[in-house]
Amino acid sequence: MDKLFHHDAVAVGDWTLSIVLLAAWLAVGFAAARWFFFFLKNRSLKADPSSGNILAKVLPIPFYALLVITGFMVSSRYAPFLESDETQILKVLKVLLLLALVYLVDSLLQGFLRQMENRHEDLENSRTFFSAILHIAVWTLGVMLLLDHLGISITPLLASLGVGSLAVALGFQSTFANLFSGVYLLIDKPARVGDFVRLSTGEEGFVKVIGWRSTQINTLSNHLVILPNSKLAENLIHNYSLPDPRCSLSVEVGVDYDSDLRRVEAVTLEVARQVQEKATGASRGYQPSISFHDFGSSAVQFSVNLEADQYPGISGVKHEFIKALHERYRKEGIVMPFPIQSVEFRGPLPTAEKGKTP
């Protein structure tokens, strides 16, 4: 009777120790976790608040799950289970622990993906796709590790996945080409959303969307050109927004040979400065310049250099400058001659033959 009572007392004591240990583990763990997440959200990463906020949102659930599972694993060692029951319970807890770790890794990767989306607006249209790819990759690897832990051979599964992946890759070759080209465009950034580009095939306009399969370009005539990413990656891209969206422009002008070139230069620069400060689309503060470069067949040729805020504004600035310069030249009496050619005869003039009127 005393032995039975002693056995029951020991069992009760073990259960008590196990429960107290579990409660202490959870209490300390939850208190430390709450302090850590508070610190992460409010005091750490002050230079980039979005990082702390995102991690504080995605980490708690998998972290608390890990805390509970490890608590049960530690406390179960002091519980008075039968040896076979203890083995089964530990096996279940290890499976849950592995799933919780996979969930934690998946949550971390999804959080970093959101963080990258906040920093790079180009990823906004592709986040859903990349998020699905990460989910599939992480959970596939997690399931394989789980099967291997349970003693189930994954070699046939790997072989099946290899054959299946090859078949899928051949069937979706063009899709994968567009996908990897889209990744290249997002990482290398030869063109960004909002940039004005011209392709070697002739299309030009503002980049509206860079997706995982295609890129949309909004033309100046307000039409949408949709290009597969693989075609865009193979094109020669003229990006007029990099490294600076401002674009210089040159207007060719010719004046009569009898003109006072110093006066022509002064008047032309005065008009150019006025247009540069007032015309829509012109870069404020830019100092225009003029350079004489050729004796033409009917005029002295020179170039006037101005600057527009961005490439599409070039035509508007040139339009305003030509109008203003023409009006000012008329007031100043500066002549811009028509293209003409003079023929000079040397020696006596040809005489008319007899009987014919010259």
Image: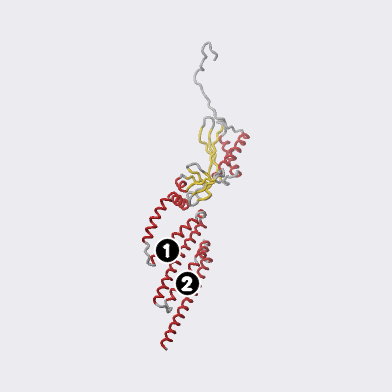
Task: Give the SS element for disc 1.
Answer: helix
Kind of residue at disc 1? Val
Kind of residue at disc 2? Val
Identify which residue, 35 or 45, lies in the foreground: 35
As drawn, which residue projects farthest toward the bottom? 2
As drawn, which residue projects farthest toward the right? 331
Q: Is residue 347 above or below residue 325?
A: above
Residue found at x 43% / y 61%: 140
Asked which quadrant contains residue 147, the reply is bottom left
Task: Give the SS element for disc 2.
Answer: helix
Residue found at x 60% / y 37%: 323
* Disc nearest the viewer among 2 and 1: 1
Residue found at x 46% / y 69%: 66
Q: Which image quadrant: the N terminus?
A: bottom left
Image coordinates of residue 112 in percent, x first then y, are 48, 60
Q: Which circle marks residue 143 in the picture? A: 1
Q: Is residue 279 above or below residue 69?
A: above
Q: Is residue 333 above or below residue 144?
A: above
Identify which residue, 112 or 142, lies in the foreground: 142
Q: Which image quadrant: the C terminus?
A: top right
Residue placed under numbered mark 2 in the picture: 68
Disc nearer the start of the sequence (2/1): 2
Identify which residue, 30 or 276, lies in the foreground: 30
Residue 244 visible in the shown view: no
Badge 1: residue crowd in 10 Å (few <14, some 14–19, many ≥20): some
